[in-house]
Amino acid sequence: MSPDRVPFRAAMIPVKVKGVGMDLSRNPLLLLIDQEEKMVLPIGIGLSEAQVISFKLGGYLFPRPLTHDLITTVCGHLGAKIMKIVVNDVRDGTYYAQIYLEQADTQIVVDARPSDGVALALASGTPLFVTEEVASHSLPFEEVVKESVEEFFDYDDEDLEDDDDDDGNDFNGDDMGGKTLH
């Protein structure tokens, strides 16, 4: 797809990467959170993208440049600055992003997958935004935290009352249900 030279004008909300987690089917989720930590936007991503983002968040340095590091370097050598990454649309459950570049006073907007845009933002230190329309698909932070804790421990009140019964339903510190949220 050729770069679009007409900037997208929509109200934008600054976000940061909270982490990478898993949905109930064990598919990777990118978790974007607003600056006030009131909303979480979960976006399904691929496993390799989840690994790269997790490594970037952890400060891991690769001996050779990854694609996102390479793009940052190429832009620098061409005199283009990566201005911002915007998750700008959601259609049929698929999120879309745009990379805003500036070169010689010309703004260039390039279509991207959100996972690639986020990895590029992490590699280059570029600000990350979502549009208000995309933010309308977010969840309240407290709801996500509450659900994560409940899923992590995976027990109910009956399990606590019936702890001397050997039916296998008791809370067991070794069996956390395989659910993690990084």
Image (cartoon, rainbow, N blue to C red):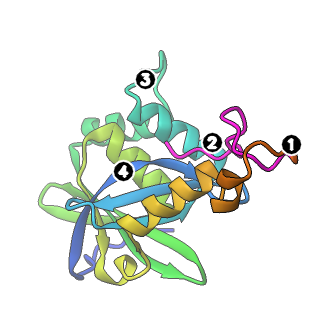
Quarter of the rendering containing residue 37? bottom left
Going from the N terminus, do you reach mark 3 or mark 4 first?
Answer: 4
**What amino acid type is highlighted by mark number 2?**
Ser
Q: Residues within 10 Å of mark 1 (few under 14, many from 20)?
A: few
Q: Nearer the viewer, residue 24 or 151?
A: 151
Direction from residue 68 to residue 13 in the image, left or right: left
Q: Is residue 46 in view from this perspective?
A: yes
Sequence-first disc among 1 and 4: 4
Q: Quadrant of residue 88?
A: bottom left
Tag 3 residue: 60
Q: Is residue 172 magenta?
A: yes
C-alpha separation, residue under disc 4 versus residue under disc 2: 17 Å
The residue that disc 4 covers is 17
Which residue is situated farthest in the left direction here? 105
Q: Which mark is residue 166?
A: 1
Residue 48: mark in rendering: 2
Q: Looking at the image, is mark 1 or mark 3 nearer the viewer?
A: 1
Q: x, y (%) of residue 100?
A: 28, 61
Amino acid bearing label 4: Val
Q: Residues within 10 Å of mark 2 (few under 14, many from 20)?
A: few
Inter-mark Cα distance, 3 to 4: 16 Å
- Per the image, label 3 sits on a secondary structure element best described as loop
- Is label 1 or label 4 in front? 1
Identify the residue shown where x is 82% and y is 46%.
165
- Between 142 and 56, the one lying in front of the other is 142
